[in-house]
């Protein structure tokens, strides 16, 4: 009887974030999923800052004036803009996930791509509108 030919066993290695970002081409739905998690983590980390801003805006008229002066700083405006993007993106992606949970026809490759495009478009438009209001365009 002929000797059995042994197939080489596949090698599985741990990969780092660098390899994920440079070697793999994620579909748009995968990017939305990762950004949904990242925006949620960002909101959680900056929750004390957001609560401080909310407290300063509501305590009294004097604290509201201090809040307006604090928010006039360009760095604080940029941080607020990033947090607004995180909230708006997380909100839109969360609605996408809720719709996918309730409608099983929405869980397909085509619907995943189209809903991802909608999430990016809606959250980008809302963030641009917020930025225009924040920086005084209207």
Image (cartoon, rainbow, N blue to C red):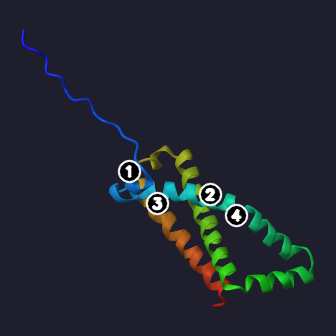
Residue 48's x, y, as percent? Answer: 76, 63
Precedes in sequence: disc 1 or disc 2: 2
Give the foreground label among 3 and 2. Answer: 2
Element on which disc 4 rests: loop
| Circle 3 crowding by C-alpha within 10 Å: few under 14, some 14–19, many from 20 | many
Image spot of residue 60 (x, y percent): 93, 78
Q: Pointer 4: what residue?
A: 46
Measure how far apart labels 1 and 2 are at the Cα level: 24 Å
Q: Please identify, in this view, whether the residue under mark 4 or under mark 2 is nearer the observer.
A: 4
Which residue of the protein is positioned furthest toward the bottom in this rendering?
137
Mark 3 or 2 closer to N-term?
A: 2
Cβ atoms at labels 3 and 1 below 8 Å apart: no
The residues bearing labels 4 and 2 have C-alpha atoms spaced at a distance of: 10 Å
Q: Decide: marks 3, 2 in contact (CB < 8 A)?
A: no
Tag 1 near tag 2, CB within 8 Å: no
In three-dimensional space, the C-alpha distance between marks 1 and 4, rounded to whole angstroms, equals 34 Å
Residue linked to disc 2: 40
């Amino acid at each position: 009887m002929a000797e059995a030919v042994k197939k080489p066993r596949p090698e599985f290695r741990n990969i780092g974030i660098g390899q994920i970002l440079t070697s793999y081409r994620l579909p748009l739905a995968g990017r939305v999923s990762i950004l949904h998690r990242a925006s949620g983590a960002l909101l959680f980390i900056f929750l004390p800052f957001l609560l401080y801003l909310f407290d300063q805006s509501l305590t009294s008229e004097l604290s509201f004036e201090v809040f307006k002066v604090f928010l006039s700083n360009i760095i604080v405006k940029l941080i607020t803009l990033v947090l607004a993007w995180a909230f708006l993106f997380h909100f839109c992606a969360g609605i996408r996930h809720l719709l996918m949970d309730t409608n099983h026809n929405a869980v397909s490759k085509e619907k995943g791509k189209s809903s991802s495009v909608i999430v990016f478009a809606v959250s980008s438009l809302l963030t641009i509108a917020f930025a225009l209001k924040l920086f005084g365009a209207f």
